[in-house]
Image: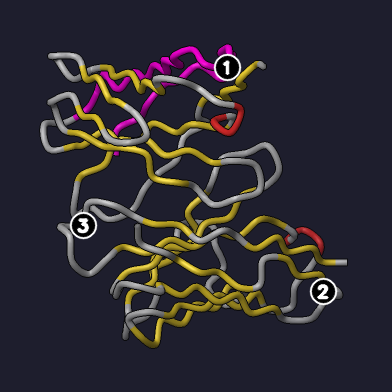
């Protein structure tokens, strides 16, 4: 799986949009971009994934650049419960495993 | 969404004893389950891949005789930490890949905090 680069930490004010960047410049054509988050002392939670089109679900939006070398996860209205470590992972569907990097520790400020 | 149940959530044991951790997919079948380990303030590290009905595949540096994995059914995988020592104290997390759905998402259990005294 390709390596991803994320800022180690970010802060965001409660109620504002949280924009989490991820660089994956060596991504292959058949690799998807996945986002998971881990709240302290819990297992990772799936957020969203996409191949090349932008995606949106009830939790977040995923914006992938046209060259697919980077992406941004957007939490539209951050709440205190969104404080967590967010992991950006690239993975070939069918390759099965997820390889975690160091992620971004997002802190939502009241 | 799919639910993966992991038990126990927390266990304390004496050095030299064995501990078994269960991982169950509650509302789906999974031919493949994964076991991860996470030390404080570090990321998740894959330990092994567990396939139903066959031997697990271990990542480099993970002792297969120490971390016994059994995946006897499509909904249950177990990890047994044998002869546990304090350095085995860690957060262990399982994940399951649904049999159907195009292998797109992995779902994770809530983790087991193991403390070896």
Front residue of A79 and A106: A79
Front residue of A106 and A16: A16
Image mark count: 3
Query: Whole-percent x and y of residue A29?
Result: 11, 31
Q: The residue tagged with tag 2: helix, strand or loop?
A: strand
Which residue is labeled 1 in the image?
Answer: A14
Which residue is labeled 3 in the image?
Answer: B103
Nearer the observer: mark 3 or 2; the answer is 3
Q: Where are the magenta residues, as a range?
A: A1-27
Tell me the distance, in whole angstroms, between the alpha carbons under discs 3 and 2.
Answer: 36 Å
- Picture quadrant of residue A38: top right
Residue B103 part of the magenta segment: no
A12 to the left or right of A34: right
Q: Which of marks 3 and 2 is nearer the N terminus?
A: 2
Q: Residue at x 27, y 65 (%)?
A: B98
Q: Which residue is drawn at 52% across and 57% down?
A: B36
Say which chain tag 1 marks: A
A11 to the left or right of B89: left
Q: Which residue is drawn at 18% across and 24% down?
A: A54
Tell me the distance, in whole angstroms, between the alpha carbons under discs 1 and 2.
Answer: 41 Å
Query: Whole-percent x and y of residue B97?
Result: 31, 63
Query: Whole-percent x and y of residue B51?
Result: 33, 75
B70 to the left or right of B100: right
Which residue is labeled 2 in the image?
Answer: B13
Nearer the observer: mark 1 or 2; the answer is 1
């Amino acid at each position: 799986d390709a390596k991803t680069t994320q800022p180690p930490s970010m802060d965001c004010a409660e109620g504002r949009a949280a924009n989490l960047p991820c660089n994956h410049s060596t991504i292959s054509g058949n690799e998807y971009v996945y986002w998971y988050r881990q709240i302290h002392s819990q297992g990772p939670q799936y957020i969203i994934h996409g191949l090349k089109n932008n995606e949106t679900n009830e939790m977040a939006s995923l914006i992938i650049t046209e060259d697919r070398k980077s992406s941004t996860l957007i939490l539209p209205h951050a709440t205190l419960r969104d404080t967590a470590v967010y992991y950006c992972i690239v993975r070939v569907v069918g390759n099965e495993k997820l390889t975690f990097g160091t992620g971004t520790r997002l802190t939502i400020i009241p | 969404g799919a639910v993966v149940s992991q038990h126990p959530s927390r266990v304390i044991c004496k050095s030299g004893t064995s501990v078994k951790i269960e991982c169950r997919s509650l509302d789906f079948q999974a031919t493949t389950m994964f076991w991860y380990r996470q030390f404080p303030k570090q990321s998740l590290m894959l330990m092994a891949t567990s396939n139903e009905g066959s031997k697990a595949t271990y990542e480099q540096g993970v002792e297969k005789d120490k971390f016994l994995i059994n995946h006897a059914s499509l909904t249950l995988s177990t990890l047994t930490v044998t002869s546990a020592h304090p350095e085995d104290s860690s957060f262990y997390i399982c994940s399951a890949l649904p049999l159907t759905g195009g292998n797109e998402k992995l779902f994770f259990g809530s983790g087991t905090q193991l403390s070896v005294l």
